[in-house]
Image (tube, rainbow, N blue to C red):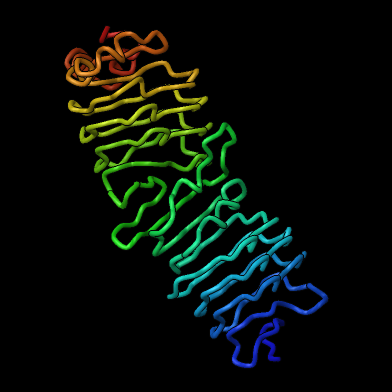
Amino acid sequence: MKYYNGLQYSNDYKICYGEEMNKSIKEAILHPNTEVIDMEAFYHAYSLEKVVAKCNLKTIGISAFDGCDALKEIIIDSPNEIKIRKDALYGTQIEKFVCTGNIKNGWELERLKFCAKHIELVQYDQIDFDIFFSETDERTNIEYLKIATKNYEFENFICFDDNPNYLGAYPQGRKEAKVYVPKNIEIIEERTFLNNDFIEEIYISENLKQTKGVIFENLKNLKFVKIDSKDFVADEDIFERCPNLEKVLLTKEAYEKNEKIFGSNKKYKVMDIDYIISKYSSMKDINNAYKEMIAR
């Protein structure tokens, strides 16, 4: 048995057995040779607040951090594929999780979505991203989400199918009143903007081509949406349970292509961007023009 920073190890330091019986360590810094965090290594380590694994980590064992009530941060810097075993994170309230290794069985990370505020994953390409998002009315706490696949890096605006033009999710806990969708986005997936209580305005560029289903759902404070695209096509009303939505600004071309959807709605005002720009010269006048209902 060997020891390093108060933790017990195998003789070659490849297996970390956790701390001794007093369970008083607040920050666990693993040995650089560590490959395995053993089963129940930190089981009910009530004082543990942070884990730093800058090593060759490959496995986090069953119930490794089970019951670590105070654990708030895990930083893993490993070049390897990492397996997170069953209940490894059970009972934790981790707020920040960063991992550079390719996580093999990420379903265990689903435990983080209602407690974590900050998640960064690199080489992450084998799991559905939607494990980080709630499909019920219970909002997740994630404020910052960064995911890097083999080909792309997505920050907060999470794209599906490794396609940088196909937007699929936005953090439900992100506290941004004004959201500007990246200009490269051409398709927006159903329920991309879901259960976020902080968004008030959304701006979408001229490159949008398609929306799939209801893309804005249960956004309690959403008031205004501007879509600059002339080409986008919606297959149904893109808003649901947005009780404070007042105005949607569209191009004339987009309105005409989607008139059956937007023309029949009685929930919010739909306005013509080109008409407003041609009629009003200053931004002050344009803002005042939002009171008008143009495209009807």
From the top left corner, tell me how far across and down residue 45 is, in percent: 75, 67
Query: Which quarter of the figure has residue 90?
Result: bottom right
Query: How many numbered discs, if any?
Result: 0
Q: Going by the image, does 140 lie left or right of 169? A: right
Query: Which quarter of the figure has residue 21?
Result: bottom right
From the top left corner, tell me how far across and down residue 296 is, in percent: 27, 6
Q: Is residue 277 above or below residue 295?
A: below
Q: Is residue 277 above or below residue 52?
A: above
Q: Is residue 160 above or below residue 99?
A: above
- Write the residue at 52% across / 68% down: 83
**In which quadrant will I find the N terminus?**
bottom right
Q: Is residue 117 above or below residue 283?
A: below
Between 290 and 216, the one lying in front of the other is: 216
- Write the residue at 57% across / 37% down: 139
Q: Residue furthest right?
A: 22
Q: Going by the image, does 1 lie left or right of 118? A: right
Query: Which quarter of the figure has residue 246?
Result: top left
Q: Going by the image, does 220 lie left or right of 233? A: right
- Write the residue at 53% across / 53% down: 118
From the top left corner, tell me how far across and down residue 151 is, in percent: 28, 60
From the top left corner, tell me how far across and down residue 289 is, in percent: 30, 12
- Write the residue at 39% across / 64% down: 123
